[in-house]
Image (tube, rainbow, N blue to C red):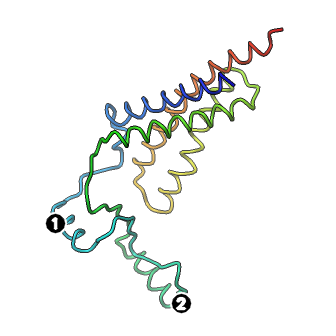
Amino acid sequence: MKNILVGGVLAGVVLFLWGAVAHMLLPIGQMGMQELPHSTSVTYALDLALEDPGLYVFPWMDPEQEMSKKALADWEEAYRDGPVGFILYRPHGGEPMSARKFVLQFATDIVAGLLVAVLLSFTALSFAGRLLFVTAVGAFSWITSSIPWWNWYGFPQDFVVGAGIYMIVGWFLAGLVLAALGDKTSSSQSEP
């Protein structure tokens, strides 16, 4: 149990540090993103049009309302013709690098590390097997979240590739810690 706790916490620390490197020192955190042209005009229009923070989708099809065949056909035509997208909007700014954001990310990474450490504890794998298992968790999380964003919402391919690099490398590095601690668990269990 101690190795699960220590391994999970250390894996979370590794994930957090990798996130800092990936976003602050490497271009991975910005892959697929670009500057908004005419940002002053666009943000002015958004300020006039939107009051509340939210994720705004266009063209919109209200799932709460039953759509007639004509309304559905109109929505499909608007979608085909474009533009299509969504806007994540907050009318009021905030601190881009607040302590709260760092603490929340750190806590999230620790919880994720602990969850994977618990999952790994149910296996009887070699070092390489444990490393592959944990790396596969990163691949799984990328495939099940980022690929649908690309497929259904048109996220840029570079953004999705960057997310894959971030997730898979991060979990590979965390896997090195968890696999090494698993060795100690295995050897201590085999001793008389």
Residue 192, image x, y percentages: 84, 8
Q: Give whichever of 184, 170 is nearer the camera.
A: 184
Name the secondary structure under disc 2.
helix
Residue 88, image x, y percentages: 35, 61
Q: Which residue is mark 2?
A: 69
Q: Where is the N terminus found, in terms of image quarters?
A: top right
Mark 2 to mark 1: distance in Å?
37 Å
Q: Which residue is mark 1?
A: 41
165 left or right of 90 in image: right
The residue sitting at 38% across, 76% down in the picture is 81
Q: Nearer the viewer, mark 2 or mark 1?
A: 1
The residue sitting at 57% across, 23% down in the picture is 176
Q: Is residue 126 above or below residue 132?
A: above
The residue sitting at 33% across, 37% down in the picture is 27
Q: Quadrant of residue 104?
A: top left
Residue 80, image x, y percentages: 42, 75
Furthest residue in direction top, as rendered: 192
